[in-house]
Image (cartoon, grey):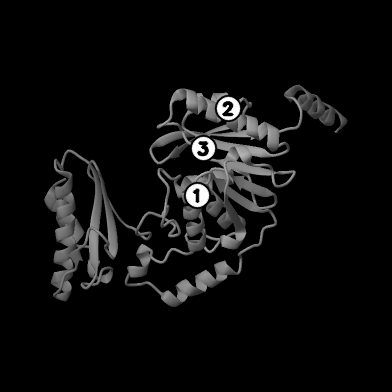
Amino acid sequence: KTIEELYNASIAFEWEALIPPDKTFAIDYTVNSPIFTHDKFASLKLKDAIADRIRNQIGERPYVDTESPDYQLYMHISDRSVDIYLDAAGESLHKRGYRTATVEAPINEVLAAGIVKISGWEGDVDLVDPMTGSGTLAIEAAFAARNMPSSWYREDFGFMHWKAFDSVLWNEIREKAREKFMVFSGNIYIYDRSSKAVSIAKYNLQNAHLEKWVDASGRPFEKLEAPSGKGVIIMNPPYGERMQMRDIIDFYKMIGNQLKRNFPGWEAWIVSSNLEAMKFIGLKPEEKHKLFNGPLEVQLAKYTLFEGDFKTMKKKKRKRIGEE
């Protein structure tokens, strides 16, 4: 009910069993309470309680490091309820460790992994990303098809700095995970009209140790042909923030024409925030999913690409269903 009660309850906890005095800590906070008119004041009282408790018990105290703390704490206050969490991840888990170079406005790694999951691609057919940017979609797809944790090559997690961290056990867990890695039969091809983007994608592929699993080359989408008779396209085209409307309409029309002309028998998954431009692809989406690229709302649409016209395809489908 009071700031003193927060301090007294916090200092009663055995922080010395958790945080050694030679380690650092930091406190992030969310406060929604009439008791604390200044959010930061509540975090300062928790910080004082932790430092005072450890100093009283051991004679030394840990210090705050807001940039790279050994122990990251989160305090959530809702009315009179206080929850304190210890962050095992450290830096956000969407940062896998492989993407050390990026193009402008790259797709979020978690979103890329989710899109691959929604598409149903499991490595049994070819996958093409014709506008690869930093290579994120292809890398996340390869990790998933190989049954590899996306953060496999990330070298630092929050729990590694904890007093109870067991490095031997951690290595055993990694070895058990390594035994489950798989080989997939499909090929992954990535392209981009920008030579800089292709270079960045190749660099990130090297960081992820996936160079032999992904074929990268510089080529514009309008010059591509399907590498096989069946496969999946996943693309994240420009949303058009820096393009004239006429240009973005023509660009999305080109996407539709190219898919219809050169990728019959394939599935295409296109993610974009420009819903108006997506109408000009000229294909009827079978599925639509509302997703978020960070704070930006985007739509993921699935298109099945068939040979001939739409009516013929529907007739064949009805006939097949009748025969079954």
Res 237 label: 3
Tell which tag, 3 or 1, sits nearer the viewer: 1
Residue 14 seen in this snapshot? no
Q: Earlier in the sequence, mark 2 or mark 3?
A: 3
Viewer-nearest residue: 274 or 9? 274
Q: Secondary structure at mark 2?
A: helix
Q: How many marks?
A: 3
Q: Earlier in the sequence, mark 2 or mark 1?
A: 1
Q: Which residue is identified by label 1?
A: 195
Q: The residue under label 3 is which amino acid type?
A: Pro
Q: Position of residue 296 (x, y in %)?
A: 40, 36
Q: Secondary structure at mark 1?
A: helix
Q: The residue under label 2 is which amino acid type?
A: Lys
Q: Which residue is identified by label 2?
A: 253
* 143 up-or-down from 294: above or below: below
Circles 3 and 1: CB distance less than 8 Å? no
Residue at horizontal 42 percent and vertical 47 percent from the top: 103
Q: Earlier in the sequence, mark 3 or mark 1?
A: 1
Q: Position of residue 216 (x, y in %)?
A: 57, 53
Q: Is residue 128 left or right of residue 102?
A: right
Q: Is residue 57 left or right of residue 28?
A: left
* 9 up-or-down from 284: above or below: below
For marks 2 and 3, give the CA distance: 12 Å
Viewer-nearest residue: 212 or 273? 212
Q: Is residue 312 left or right of residue 76?
A: right
For marks 2 and 1, give the CA distance: 24 Å
